[in-house]
Image (cartoon, rainbow, N blue to C red):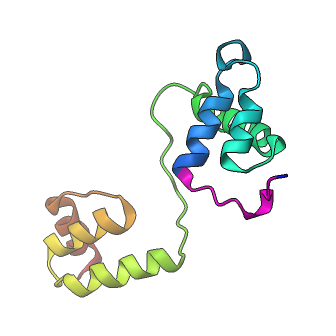
Amino acid sequence: MAEYRLARLDLSTRLQLTLEMLTPRAVRGWGRVTALAAEHQVSRSLLYALRDRGQAALLTALAPQPPGPRSPVTTLTVDPAFIQRAMAILATQRGTVRGIQQGLALLFQAPRSVGYISQTLTTLGV
């Protein structure tokens, strides 16, 4: 009996196994699952689980989406990655309109023209 728990499958091997398991049984051939299990020292149930997870992932990824552009995001998630990006960007920017423009684009994916930024700053009295 193979030692199933000791098998280490890297991503490319799991992907290859999943794709082969998604191949229709008539094309894959009789006994192929048993041969794959023996070759990679894994259980057949793991191979069927890979198939099911791969099929679910493909169905989710390829499901029809509503047409048209996505609605703009109006919320901001401040997580550690965002804080690190902010620190890196703010460390490189000077207090210029172009620096503000670049910071807005990099931090918030909110591109604004130099004129818009200048007018806003003037309106705010900055």
Whether the magenta-drawn stretch holds residue 10 is answered as yes
Locate the C terminus by quadrant.
bottom left
Residue 100 located left or right of residue 4:
left
> Residue at point 37% right, 76% down?
85
> Residue at point 15% right, 60% down?
115
Give above or below for 8 relative to 43. below
Residue 50 located left or right of residue 75:
right
* Residue 42 pos. (x, y %): 75, 49
- Between 32 and 9, the residue placed more toward the observer is 32
* Residue 120 pos. (x, y %): 25, 68
- Between 106 and 25, the residue placed more toward the observer is 25
Q: Magenta stretch: dominant SS?
A: loop
Q: Please provide the residue range marked out in magenta.
A: 2-11
- Between 27 and 93, the residue placed more toward the observer is 27
- Tally the numbered discs: 0
> Residue at point 65% right, 60% down?
8
Residue 69 located left or right of residue 41:
left
> Residue at point 54% right, 76% down?
79
Report the residue that reaches farthest toward the top.
26
* Residue 73 pos. (x, y %): 51, 53
Give above or below for 109 relative to 65. below
- Between 58 and 94, the residue placed more toward the observer is 58
Q: State which quadrant residue 27 falls in.
A: top right
* Residue 116 pos. (x, y %): 21, 60
Give above or below for 115 relative to 89. above
Whether the magenta-drawn stretch holds residue 31 is answered as no
